[in-house]
Amino acid sequence: ASLRAVLGTACGRLGARGPANRSGRGWTLHQGQGLWRSQRAGPGIAGEIIFATHAGGRTMLQLTKNPLPFVAAQTSGDEWQIEFIPQGRTFSGRGTPTPRLLWIHLARALNGTKPPAPLEFKQTEPHGFTLENPKSGESITGFLSE
């Protein structure tokens, strides 16, 4: 997916902030691979991760299971939104969302914000990460380009 396509479709939906600059100016893009497990011993969903940050503090994170987006998360200040695309479910709010919305916390953690307890975020080399809820066993592991 191109940066223009990702930012043009995903980032224009967040609250009253208005549409993102569709030209992609001010955005930094990182791409990689990830594995999302909804429970410790459960099967994982592997796919491509696209993570974008904006100089103004906004983030966009998307997991794509080819050929379609699977989950898309956005943050802007204390606002957040997450969309589970296959189910057609969207959640949004302000402040700190429930730990069950792991993708929002991953977007914030990758942008330098420590996630709330009980979530644990670890960065690994080279360019890897793990975000886990030790209580539920849900986790996201992966890596991103620099």
Image: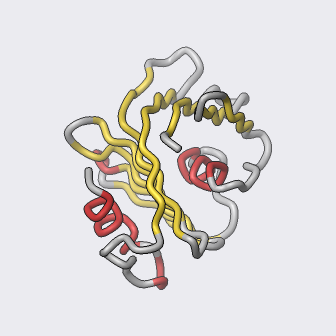
* Relative depth, front residue between 119 and 59: 59
Q: Could you say which quadrant of the image residue 117 lies in?
A: top right
Residue 93 is at least partly visible in this image = no
Q: Could you say which quadrant of the image residue 55 lies in?
A: bottom right
Q: Is residue 120 above or below residue 103?
A: above
Q: Which colour scheme appears in the figure?
A: secondary structure
* Relative depth, front residue between 106 and 118: 106
Provide residue 131's location: percent of width, then percent of height: 64, 36
At 49% from the left edge and 18% from the top edge, which residue is drawn? 42
3 displayed left or right of 123: left
Taking the view exactly as shown, the residue that stands out farthest to the right is 117
* Relative depth, front residue between 74 and 39: 74
Taking the view exactly as shown, the residue that stands out farthest to the top is 41
Provide residue 94's location: percent of width, then percent of height: 62, 71
At 68% from the left edge and 68% from the top edge, which residue is drawn? 95
Residue 91 is at least partly visible in this image = yes
At 39% from the left edge and 43% from the top edge, which residue is drawn? 63
Provide residue 24's location: percent of width, then percent of height: 36, 70
Q: Is residue 75 above or below residue 43?
A: below
1 displayed left or right of 114: left
At 62% from the left edge and 34% from the top edge, which residue is drawn? 129
